[in-house]
Image (cartoon, rainbow, N blue to C red):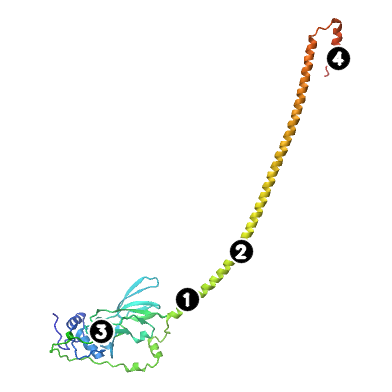
Amino acid sequence: MPAKVKTLKDTGISSTDNEAIVKYLQFKGIDPLPKVVPALLNSADITNYVALTGMLCPFNINNLKPASYGIPLLGKCVFWDAEGIRKSAVIGHEDIFTLPKNSITFVTLEPTIRLPDYIAARFNLTIDQIYRGLLLGTGPLVDPGFSGKLSIPLHNLTANDYSLRGGDRLIWIEFTKISPIDSWKNTDNSMNYNLLGKYVPFPEKKNKRDDVDDYLYEADPHRPIRSSIPLEIHKAAENVRIASQRAYEAEKTIRKLSIGFVIGTVIAATATIISLFASIYQVNSLVQDAVNYVSNANELSSTKFSNFRATENNTNAEINALQTQVANLKNTLNTPIPTNSQNILLSEIVTETPYPTTTQR
């Protein structure tokens, strides 16, 4: 069992996390300050509960406001770049981290928070970050009994990059004591604390901010604080206009190409038809010439054949005539001729068939 805390000397602000754990385990379910009514805690009560229960570690009294405490940015951060690649880094004291425009980054807060069962917490961005146009993704409540570090999403939906420095206050956290139950009552009468918690009043100089420009100037005096959403809408509208113009020009081009295509198709079809008819005419002419040639050849062949048959008939007739003459001559030679008439017949024969007596050279 951890040693009990008896006096404020024993319950000073914890210098180590182990000291805070000892106090938290002792007073997690027992309220050491039962006279503090359930309400939003003031800065004195915040200090006393931190000292007694280890509610925050580390704790810097200079970060107190009347009813809240400033939590620094410190530790691991995670984000995704423009290509969707997950990135992570550890932000140390005095390290500069750039919160890109149009981005969401998950950052870690410095202290470990250990809420007793009777204290709840809420938080929001510091006022200068709010007037930069940053947004903080917060839950409705950090419930009693929570123990650990808070990690929060920071939304930079502006058109500006912002730099954050490790160790600087990022949020204000407030603590509320909830309505009591019997088990939280402190029955140890020996616990009489000489409490040293002091109330921290609101800084008078911050009451001089009467105009929104005062807040904006403190947040970022050199650049306009504006959302990137209208710029993106304008860009989108311009892109739509350009796309519509290109679509219209493309439509006109397509129409021209379509008309030209139709005309070209008609011309090409006409030329093809003309060429086809010319080819058909040429083929018909060639066929007709072939027919005429065949007809002429047939007619010529028929004429020549007729002439040949006539010549053959004449030749055959002459041959028959010669054969008749030869037969007659044979008959004549075989017939006996009288002596007194041989000379006459011979002379007749000779006369009928004269032969040359001399040979001309």
Q: Which image quarter: residue 107?
A: bottom left
Q: Is residue 17 left or right of residue 351?
A: left
Q: Is 262 on the left or on the right of 123, as rendered?
A: right
Q: Secondary structure at mark 3?
A: strand
Q: Earlier in the sequence, mark 3 or mark 2?
A: 3
Q: Amino acid at mark 3?
A: Ala
Tag in front: 2 or 1: 2
Sooner in the amino-acid sequence: mark 2 or mark 1? 1
Residue found at x 61% / y 59%: 265
Q: For the point 69% across and 41% down, which residue is it?
A: 291
Please name the amino acid that badge 4 sits on.
Answer: Thr
Contact, mark 2 vs mark 4 (Cβ under 8 Å): no
Q: Residues within 10 Å of mark 1 (few under 14, many from 20)?
A: few
Q: Label 3 to label 1, Cα distance in Å? A: 44 Å
Which of disc 1 and disc 4 is earlier in sequence? Answer: 1
| Horizontal and vertical percent position of residue 233 | 46, 78
Q: Gap in Å between the C-alphas at discs 2 and 4?
A: 105 Å
The reply to whether the C-beta atoms of the residues labelled 3 and 1 are less than 8 Å apart is: no
Badge 1 is on which residue? 236
* Numbered circle sitting on residue 120: 3
Task: Give me the C-alpha separation between circle 4 and circle 3.
Answer: 175 Å
- Pick whichever, 239 or 10, lies toward us: 239
- Mark 2 crowd level (few <14, some 14–19, many ≥20, 10 Å Cα): few
Q: Which quarter of the image is occupied by the C terminus? A: top right
Residue 61 is situated, as x and y percent measured from the top left of the image, at 25, 88
The residue beneath circle 4 is 351
Compared with 40, 283 (above or below) is: above
Distance of label 2 from label 1 (alpha carbons): 35 Å
Image quarter where the N terminus lies is: bottom left
